[in-house]
Amino acid sequence: MIKVAFFLANERIADVDCSDVVSGNPGVGGSEHQIILISSLLAARNNNLSVCLYVEKEGRFPKGLDVVCVNSIQDAFFDASKRGYDRFVFDKKNVAWNEKPFCDYQTNMKIYPWCHNICGKEEQDFWAGHPLLGRIVCVGREQADLYRYRKAFLCSDYIYNCVPLNQDKVNKVKKKQYKRNHNVVYVGSLVPAKCFHVLASVWKDVVAAIPDAQLFVIGSGNLYDRNARLGDYGIAEESYEKEFMPHLLEDGTLMPSVHFLGRMGREKDDVLLKMKLGIPNPLGVTETFCLSAVEMQMMGCSVAAMDCFAYYDTFVNGKISKNRKAFVKDIVSLLTKDDAVGYDFVVKKLRKFDIGPVMNDWERLLNNNQKDAFCHPLWPLHNCFVKHKWAKELLRLLARPFPIVYKVL
Protein backbone atom coordinates (compact mmCIF):
# COMPACT_ATOMS: atom_id res chain seq x y z
CA MET A 1 0.00 0.00 0.00
CA ILE A 2 1.42 3.36 -1.06
CA LYS A 3 0.66 6.23 1.32
CA VAL A 4 -0.09 9.58 -0.35
CA ALA A 5 -0.44 12.92 1.44
CA PHE A 6 -2.00 16.01 -0.18
CA PHE A 7 -1.74 19.53 1.24
CA LEU A 8 -4.47 22.18 1.01
CA ALA A 9 -3.96 25.83 1.97
CA ASN A 10 -7.53 26.46 3.15
CA GLU A 11 -7.19 29.20 5.76
CA ARG A 12 -9.20 31.68 3.66
CA ILE A 13 -11.89 29.22 2.54
CA ALA A 14 -12.42 27.18 5.72
CA ASP A 15 -16.02 28.39 6.00
CA VAL A 16 -17.02 26.93 2.59
CA ASP A 17 -18.82 23.57 2.59
CA CYS A 18 -16.57 21.31 0.49
CA SER A 19 -18.28 18.04 1.40
CA ASP A 20 -19.68 17.46 -2.11
CA VAL A 21 -17.00 18.64 -4.51
CA VAL A 22 -17.89 15.94 -7.05
CA SER A 23 -21.09 17.84 -7.85
CA GLY A 24 -19.12 20.99 -8.66
CA ASN A 25 -17.03 23.81 -7.28
CA PRO A 26 -18.78 25.17 -4.15
CA GLY A 27 -17.25 28.62 -4.65
CA VAL A 28 -13.50 28.32 -4.03
CA GLY A 29 -10.49 28.69 -6.28
CA GLY A 30 -10.01 26.11 -9.01
CA SER A 31 -6.76 24.69 -7.60
CA GLU A 32 -8.28 24.32 -4.11
CA HIS A 33 -11.29 22.55 -5.58
CA GLN A 34 -9.03 20.17 -7.50
CA ILE A 35 -6.92 19.27 -4.47
CA ILE A 36 -10.01 18.29 -2.47
CA LEU A 37 -11.64 16.54 -5.42
CA ILE A 38 -8.62 14.48 -6.48
CA SER A 39 -7.62 13.46 -2.95
CA SER A 40 -11.18 12.41 -2.05
CA LEU A 41 -11.68 10.46 -5.28
CA LEU A 42 -8.37 8.64 -4.85
CA ALA A 43 -9.26 7.82 -1.25
CA ALA A 44 -12.56 6.26 -2.32
CA ARG A 45 -11.16 4.02 -5.06
CA ASN A 46 -9.60 0.55 -4.94
CA ASN A 47 -6.13 1.54 -6.15
CA ASN A 48 -3.45 0.45 -3.66
CA LEU A 49 -3.29 4.01 -2.31
CA SER A 50 -3.88 5.25 1.23
CA VAL A 51 -4.70 8.96 1.03
CA CYS A 52 -4.60 11.76 3.60
CA LEU A 53 -5.38 15.46 3.18
CA TYR A 54 -3.46 17.96 5.32
CA VAL A 55 -5.23 21.31 5.86
CA GLU A 56 -4.53 24.55 7.67
CA LYS A 57 -7.98 24.79 9.25
CA GLU A 58 -10.78 22.41 10.03
CA GLY A 59 -13.64 22.46 7.56
CA ARG A 60 -16.30 20.38 5.86
CA PHE A 61 -14.77 17.79 3.56
CA PRO A 62 -16.00 14.66 1.73
CA LYS A 63 -16.85 11.67 3.88
CA GLY A 64 -14.23 8.96 3.95
CA LEU A 65 -11.31 11.35 3.43
CA ASP A 66 -8.74 11.31 6.23
CA VAL A 67 -8.10 14.97 7.13
CA VAL A 68 -5.30 16.23 9.42
CA CYS A 69 -5.05 19.84 10.58
CA VAL A 70 -1.58 21.47 10.72
CA ASN A 71 -0.19 24.98 10.96
CA SER A 72 1.70 25.09 7.66
CA ILE A 73 2.85 23.13 4.65
CA GLN A 74 6.20 22.56 6.35
CA ASP A 75 4.43 20.95 9.32
CA ALA A 76 2.41 18.82 6.91
CA PHE A 77 5.60 17.67 5.16
CA PHE A 78 7.36 16.77 8.42
CA ASP A 79 4.32 14.98 9.86
CA ALA A 80 3.70 13.01 6.66
CA SER A 81 7.34 11.92 6.60
CA LYS A 82 7.22 10.80 10.23
CA ARG A 83 4.06 8.81 9.52
CA GLY A 84 5.81 6.99 6.72
CA TYR A 85 4.04 8.51 3.74
CA ASP A 86 5.55 7.77 0.35
CA ARG A 87 4.22 10.70 -1.70
CA PHE A 88 3.61 14.36 -0.82
CA VAL A 89 1.46 16.30 -3.35
CA PHE A 90 1.08 20.08 -3.06
CA ASP A 91 0.23 23.13 -5.11
CA LYS A 92 3.64 24.57 -5.92
CA LYS A 93 2.44 28.13 -5.27
CA ASN A 94 2.07 27.25 -1.58
CA VAL A 95 5.84 27.30 -1.10
CA ALA A 96 8.57 29.80 -1.93
CA TRP A 97 10.80 27.73 -4.20
CA ASN A 98 13.70 30.19 -3.90
CA GLU A 99 13.87 29.34 -0.19
CA LYS A 100 14.68 25.76 -1.24
CA PRO A 101 11.84 23.99 0.59
CA PHE A 102 12.27 20.38 1.80
CA CYS A 103 15.86 20.21 0.54
CA ASP A 104 17.60 19.63 3.87
CA TYR A 105 15.30 16.94 5.22
CA GLN A 106 16.33 13.29 5.06
CA THR A 107 13.34 11.18 4.02
CA ASN A 108 12.32 8.51 1.57
CA MET A 109 9.11 10.43 0.78
CA LYS A 110 8.91 11.85 -2.74
CA ILE A 111 7.43 15.27 -3.49
CA TYR A 112 5.06 16.09 -6.36
CA PRO A 113 4.79 19.86 -6.97
CA TRP A 114 1.46 20.35 -8.74
CA CYS A 115 1.75 23.26 -11.18
CA HIS A 116 -1.58 25.06 -11.28
CA ASN A 117 0.42 28.14 -12.27
CA ILE A 118 3.24 28.80 -14.72
CA CYS A 119 6.81 27.92 -13.68
CA GLY A 120 9.62 30.28 -14.61
CA LYS A 121 12.95 28.92 -15.85
CA GLU A 122 14.73 29.14 -12.49
CA GLU A 123 11.81 27.52 -10.69
CA GLN A 124 11.72 24.72 -13.27
CA ASP A 125 15.42 24.09 -12.75
CA PHE A 126 14.98 24.05 -8.98
CA TRP A 127 12.24 21.43 -8.97
CA ALA A 128 13.98 19.37 -11.64
CA GLY A 129 17.09 19.17 -9.46
CA HIS A 130 15.31 18.63 -6.15
CA PRO A 131 16.69 15.56 -4.33
CA LEU A 132 13.21 14.40 -3.30
CA LEU A 133 11.42 14.96 -6.61
CA GLY A 134 9.01 12.31 -7.75
CA ARG A 135 7.48 14.21 -10.66
CA ILE A 136 6.53 17.78 -11.59
CA VAL A 137 2.80 17.57 -12.35
CA CYS A 138 1.35 19.91 -14.99
CA VAL A 139 -2.39 20.32 -15.48
CA GLY A 140 -2.40 20.02 -19.27
CA ARG A 141 -0.43 18.83 -22.28
CA GLU A 142 0.09 22.36 -23.57
CA GLN A 143 1.49 23.50 -20.23
CA ALA A 144 3.95 20.59 -20.11
CA ASP A 145 5.03 21.34 -23.68
CA LEU A 146 6.00 24.88 -22.70
CA TYR A 147 8.98 23.28 -20.94
CA ARG A 148 9.79 20.81 -23.72
CA TYR A 149 13.29 22.19 -24.28
CA ARG A 150 14.16 22.53 -20.56
CA LYS A 151 15.65 19.85 -18.35
CA ALA A 152 12.48 19.99 -16.25
CA PHE A 153 10.51 18.46 -19.13
CA LEU A 154 11.76 14.91 -18.63
CA CYS A 155 11.01 15.25 -14.90
CA SER A 156 7.44 16.35 -15.65
CA ASP A 157 4.15 14.82 -16.63
CA TYR A 158 0.68 16.19 -17.18
CA ILE A 159 -2.66 15.13 -15.78
CA TYR A 160 -5.70 17.12 -16.83
CA ASN A 161 -7.79 18.78 -14.16
CA CYS A 162 -10.89 16.76 -13.36
CA VAL A 163 -14.34 18.05 -14.31
CA PRO A 164 -16.85 15.26 -13.54
CA LEU A 165 -19.28 14.69 -16.40
CA ASN A 166 -22.59 14.41 -14.60
CA GLN A 167 -25.26 12.64 -16.66
CA ASP A 168 -28.07 14.65 -15.04
CA LYS A 169 -26.37 17.82 -16.24
CA VAL A 170 -25.96 16.36 -19.71
CA ASN A 171 -29.66 15.54 -19.87
CA LYS A 172 -30.61 19.06 -18.74
CA VAL A 173 -28.38 20.59 -21.40
CA LYS A 174 -29.86 18.44 -24.15
CA LYS A 175 -33.30 19.81 -23.28
CA LYS A 176 -32.09 23.43 -23.41
CA GLN A 177 -29.35 23.28 -26.03
CA TYR A 178 -31.01 25.19 -28.82
CA LYS A 179 -32.56 28.63 -29.29
CA ARG A 180 -30.81 30.26 -26.36
CA ASN A 181 -30.94 34.05 -26.22
CA HIS A 182 -27.93 36.23 -27.01
CA ASN A 183 -26.60 35.77 -23.48
CA VAL A 184 -22.88 35.98 -22.66
CA VAL A 185 -21.42 34.83 -19.34
CA TYR A 186 -18.07 35.54 -17.72
CA VAL A 187 -16.98 33.23 -14.90
CA GLY A 188 -13.94 34.06 -12.82
CA SER A 189 -12.41 36.16 -10.13
CA LEU A 190 -12.63 39.91 -10.73
CA VAL A 191 -8.93 40.60 -10.33
CA PRO A 192 -6.51 42.01 -12.94
CA ALA A 193 -4.91 38.61 -13.62
CA LYS A 194 -8.24 37.24 -14.89
CA CYS A 195 -8.59 40.13 -17.39
CA PHE A 196 -12.31 40.90 -17.07
CA HIS A 197 -11.39 44.49 -17.98
CA VAL A 198 -10.64 43.32 -21.53
CA LEU A 199 -14.16 41.96 -21.96
CA ALA A 200 -15.58 45.13 -20.40
CA SER A 201 -13.62 47.28 -22.86
CA VAL A 202 -15.25 45.63 -25.90
CA TRP A 203 -18.76 45.08 -24.55
CA LYS A 204 -20.22 48.25 -26.10
CA ASP A 205 -18.92 47.06 -29.49
CA VAL A 206 -20.77 43.77 -28.98
CA VAL A 207 -24.00 45.57 -28.06
CA ALA A 208 -23.64 47.84 -31.09
CA ALA A 209 -23.64 44.72 -33.29
CA ILE A 210 -26.25 42.77 -31.28
CA PRO A 211 -28.53 45.21 -29.40
CA ASP A 212 -30.24 42.52 -27.33
CA ALA A 213 -26.97 40.95 -26.12
CA GLN A 214 -26.79 40.48 -22.35
CA LEU A 215 -23.67 40.04 -20.20
CA PHE A 216 -23.84 38.06 -16.95
CA VAL A 217 -20.81 38.20 -14.65
CA ILE A 218 -20.28 35.39 -12.15
CA GLY A 219 -17.45 36.13 -9.76
CA SER A 220 -16.12 38.65 -7.29
CA GLY A 221 -12.95 40.38 -6.29
CA ASN A 222 -12.83 38.32 -3.09
CA LEU A 223 -13.04 34.82 -4.57
CA TYR A 224 -9.49 33.96 -3.48
CA ASP A 225 -9.39 36.26 -0.46
CA ARG A 226 -12.60 36.56 1.55
CA ASN A 227 -11.08 39.53 3.41
CA ALA A 228 -10.33 41.61 0.30
CA ARG A 229 -11.71 45.17 0.49
CA LEU A 230 -14.00 45.94 -2.43
CA GLY A 231 -14.72 49.27 -4.15
CA ASP A 232 -17.86 51.42 -4.22
CA TYR A 233 -19.77 48.95 -6.39
CA GLY A 234 -18.90 45.99 -4.16
CA ILE A 235 -17.64 44.09 -7.19
CA ALA A 236 -13.84 44.23 -7.14
CA GLU A 237 -10.95 45.92 -5.39
CA GLU A 238 -11.33 49.71 -5.69
CA SER A 239 -8.51 50.43 -8.15
CA TYR A 240 -9.61 47.57 -10.41
CA GLU A 241 -13.25 48.71 -10.36
CA LYS A 242 -12.06 52.11 -11.54
CA GLU A 243 -10.32 50.41 -14.45
CA PHE A 244 -13.22 48.42 -15.88
CA MET A 245 -16.44 50.10 -14.68
CA PRO A 246 -16.20 53.19 -16.97
CA HIS A 247 -16.56 50.83 -19.95
CA LEU A 248 -19.86 49.53 -18.57
CA LEU A 249 -21.53 52.82 -17.68
CA GLU A 250 -23.95 54.96 -19.66
CA ASP A 251 -24.68 58.42 -18.30
CA GLY A 252 -23.13 57.39 -15.00
CA THR A 253 -25.23 54.27 -14.49
CA LEU A 254 -24.63 50.60 -15.24
CA MET A 255 -25.64 49.54 -18.74
CA PRO A 256 -28.96 47.63 -18.68
CA SER A 257 -27.31 44.78 -20.57
CA VAL A 258 -24.79 44.06 -17.77
CA HIS A 259 -25.65 41.94 -14.74
CA PHE A 260 -23.25 41.24 -11.85
CA LEU A 261 -24.31 38.05 -10.07
CA GLY A 262 -21.52 37.87 -7.50
CA ARG A 263 -19.73 34.77 -6.27
CA MET A 264 -21.66 31.56 -6.91
CA GLY A 265 -21.21 27.88 -6.18
CA ARG A 266 -22.95 24.99 -7.90
CA GLU A 267 -26.03 27.14 -8.48
CA LYS A 268 -24.18 28.78 -11.36
CA ASP A 269 -25.10 25.76 -13.49
CA ASP A 270 -28.69 27.04 -13.66
CA VAL A 271 -27.35 30.33 -15.03
CA LEU A 272 -25.06 28.60 -17.54
CA LEU A 273 -28.04 26.66 -18.93
CA LYS A 274 -29.43 29.98 -20.19
CA MET A 275 -26.20 31.21 -21.75
CA LYS A 276 -25.21 30.88 -25.38
CA LEU A 277 -21.58 32.00 -25.08
CA GLY A 278 -19.11 31.67 -22.24
CA ILE A 279 -16.01 33.81 -21.88
CA PRO A 280 -13.32 32.73 -19.43
CA ASN A 281 -10.17 34.79 -18.89
CA PRO A 282 -10.24 36.86 -22.13
CA LEU A 283 -6.46 37.07 -22.50
CA GLY A 284 -5.67 33.75 -20.87
CA VAL A 285 -3.09 35.43 -18.65
CA THR A 286 -2.15 33.06 -15.76
CA GLU A 287 -4.26 30.23 -17.23
CA THR A 288 -2.74 26.76 -17.39
CA PHE A 289 -5.98 24.82 -17.99
CA CYS A 290 -9.12 26.94 -17.41
CA LEU A 291 -11.71 24.94 -15.51
CA SER A 292 -14.43 27.47 -16.22
CA ALA A 293 -14.04 26.92 -19.98
CA VAL A 294 -14.73 23.20 -19.55
CA GLU A 295 -17.66 23.84 -17.21
CA MET A 296 -19.21 26.29 -19.68
CA GLN A 297 -19.00 23.85 -22.57
CA MET A 298 -20.42 21.04 -20.45
CA MET A 299 -23.44 23.25 -19.83
CA GLY A 300 -23.96 23.78 -23.57
CA CYS A 301 -22.17 27.08 -24.11
CA SER A 302 -19.69 27.79 -26.84
CA VAL A 303 -16.60 29.69 -25.67
CA ALA A 304 -14.44 32.57 -26.87
CA ALA A 305 -11.17 34.11 -25.72
CA MET A 306 -7.88 35.35 -27.09
CA ASP A 307 -4.79 33.28 -27.82
CA CYS A 308 -3.55 31.28 -24.83
CA PHE A 309 -1.75 27.93 -24.89
CA ALA A 310 -4.09 26.40 -22.29
CA TYR A 311 -7.15 26.93 -24.47
CA TYR A 312 -5.80 24.52 -27.06
CA ASP A 313 -6.37 21.81 -24.42
CA THR A 314 -9.79 22.89 -23.20
CA PHE A 315 -11.62 24.65 -26.08
CA VAL A 316 -13.59 22.07 -28.08
CA ASN A 317 -16.57 24.26 -29.05
CA GLY A 318 -15.54 27.85 -29.65
CA LYS A 319 -12.98 30.23 -31.07
CA ILE A 320 -9.52 31.41 -30.04
CA SER A 321 -8.96 34.97 -31.31
CA LYS A 322 -5.64 36.55 -32.25
CA ASN A 323 -6.43 40.12 -31.14
CA ARG A 324 -9.20 42.32 -29.70
CA LYS A 325 -10.74 43.16 -33.06
CA ALA A 326 -11.00 39.46 -33.89
CA PHE A 327 -12.29 38.81 -30.37
CA VAL A 328 -15.31 41.08 -30.92
CA LYS A 329 -15.91 39.56 -34.34
CA ASP A 330 -15.82 36.04 -32.89
CA ILE A 331 -18.19 36.93 -30.04
CA VAL A 332 -20.71 38.31 -32.53
CA SER A 333 -20.27 35.31 -34.83
CA LEU A 334 -20.79 32.76 -32.05
CA LEU A 335 -23.84 34.60 -30.69
CA THR A 336 -25.58 34.85 -34.04
CA LYS A 337 -24.89 31.43 -35.52
CA ASP A 338 -26.85 28.27 -34.86
CA ASP A 339 -25.01 25.62 -32.90
CA ALA A 340 -23.32 23.70 -35.68
CA VAL A 341 -21.38 21.51 -33.26
CA GLY A 342 -23.60 18.77 -31.88
CA TYR A 343 -23.66 18.53 -28.12
CA ASP A 344 -22.94 14.79 -28.23
CA PHE A 345 -19.71 15.62 -30.06
CA VAL A 346 -18.79 18.18 -27.39
CA VAL A 347 -19.44 15.68 -24.59
CA LYS A 348 -17.28 13.09 -26.32
CA LYS A 349 -14.41 15.56 -26.58
CA LEU A 350 -14.77 16.58 -22.92
CA ARG A 351 -14.66 13.02 -21.57
CA LYS A 352 -10.88 13.20 -21.21
CA PHE A 353 -11.53 15.48 -18.21
CA ASP A 354 -13.98 13.06 -16.55
CA ILE A 355 -13.27 11.10 -13.37
CA GLY A 356 -12.26 7.82 -15.03
CA PRO A 357 -9.45 9.04 -17.34
CA VAL A 358 -8.09 11.54 -14.81
CA MET A 359 -8.07 9.08 -11.91
CA ASN A 360 -6.38 6.45 -14.05
CA ASP A 361 -3.55 8.90 -14.73
CA TRP A 362 -3.16 9.85 -11.06
CA GLU A 363 -3.11 6.21 -10.00
CA ARG A 364 -0.57 5.35 -12.68
CA LEU A 365 1.63 8.25 -11.57
CA LEU A 366 1.46 7.63 -7.82
CA ASN A 367 1.89 3.87 -8.09
CA ASN A 368 5.00 4.21 -10.24
CA ASN A 369 8.44 4.27 -8.61
CA GLN A 370 10.41 5.00 -11.78
CA LYS A 371 11.35 8.64 -12.24
CA ASP A 372 11.50 8.32 -16.03
CA ALA A 373 8.11 6.61 -16.47
CA PHE A 374 5.52 8.86 -18.15
CA CYS A 375 1.73 8.74 -18.04
CA HIS A 376 1.73 10.08 -21.60
CA PRO A 377 4.02 9.58 -24.62
CA LEU A 378 6.35 12.33 -25.76
CA TRP A 379 5.14 11.92 -29.34
CA PRO A 380 3.39 12.87 -31.51
CA LEU A 381 3.52 16.63 -31.18
CA HIS A 382 0.16 18.42 -31.06
CA ASN A 383 -0.41 22.05 -32.04
CA CYS A 384 3.16 22.28 -33.29
CA PHE A 385 3.09 26.03 -33.90
CA VAL A 386 1.68 27.05 -30.50
CA LYS A 387 4.39 28.82 -28.53
CA HIS A 388 7.00 27.63 -31.07
CA LYS A 389 6.61 24.06 -29.89
CA TRP A 390 8.32 22.61 -32.96
CA ALA A 391 11.45 24.68 -32.23
CA LYS A 392 11.44 23.64 -28.58
CA GLU A 393 11.31 19.98 -29.59
CA LEU A 394 14.20 20.53 -32.00
CA LEU A 395 16.23 22.06 -29.17
CA ARG A 396 15.39 19.14 -26.89
CA LEU A 397 16.66 16.66 -29.48
CA LEU A 398 19.87 18.66 -29.93
CA ALA A 399 20.58 19.00 -26.21
CA ARG A 400 22.38 15.70 -25.61
CA PRO A 401 24.34 15.07 -28.85
CA PHE A 402 25.16 18.75 -29.48
CA PRO A 403 25.20 20.60 -26.11
CA ILE A 404 27.14 23.58 -27.47
CA VAL A 405 24.70 24.06 -30.36
CA TYR A 406 21.79 23.74 -27.89
CA LYS A 407 23.28 26.37 -25.60
CA VAL A 408 23.93 28.82 -28.45
CA LEU A 409 20.43 28.42 -29.93
Image (cartoon, grey):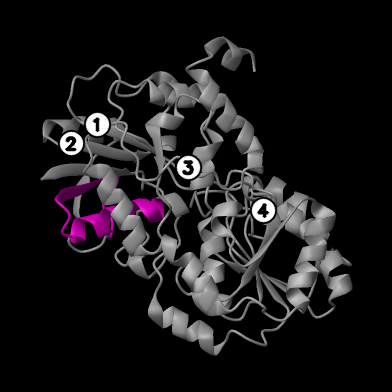
Q: Is residue 397 above or below residue 41?
A: above
Labels 2 and 4: the sequence-earlier one: 2
Q: Return the residue nearer the eye: 229 or 379.
A: 379
Give the amino acid at mark 4. Gly
Name the residue type under label 3.
Trp
Q: Does the CB distance between marks 2 and 4 fall below 8 Å? A: no
Question: Which residues are the magenta region?
Answer: 32-60
Q: Residues within 10 Å of mark 4 (few under 14, many from 20)?
A: some
Q: Dot 1 corresponds to which residue? A: 110
- For label 3, the SS is loop
> Would you call the spot at circle 1 few (<14 residues within 10 Å), some (14-19), or many (20 or more)?
many
Please tell me which of labels 3 and 4 falls first in the chain.
Answer: 4
Instruction: Compare marks 2 and 1 and give the one earlier in the sequence.
Output: 2
Q: Is residue 55 visible?
A: no
Asked which quadrant contains residue 74, the reply is: top left
Please state which of residues 39 and 152 is positioned toward the viewer in this rendering.
Answer: 152
Q: Residue at x 56, y 69 (%)?
A: 297
Tag in front: 3 or 4: 3
Q: Quadrant of the N terminus?
A: top left
Q: Which mark is residue 379?
A: 3
**Residue at image mark 4:** 231
Q: Helix, strand or loop at disc 2?
A: loop
| Percent coordinates x, y for residue 171 in the rendering | 45, 85
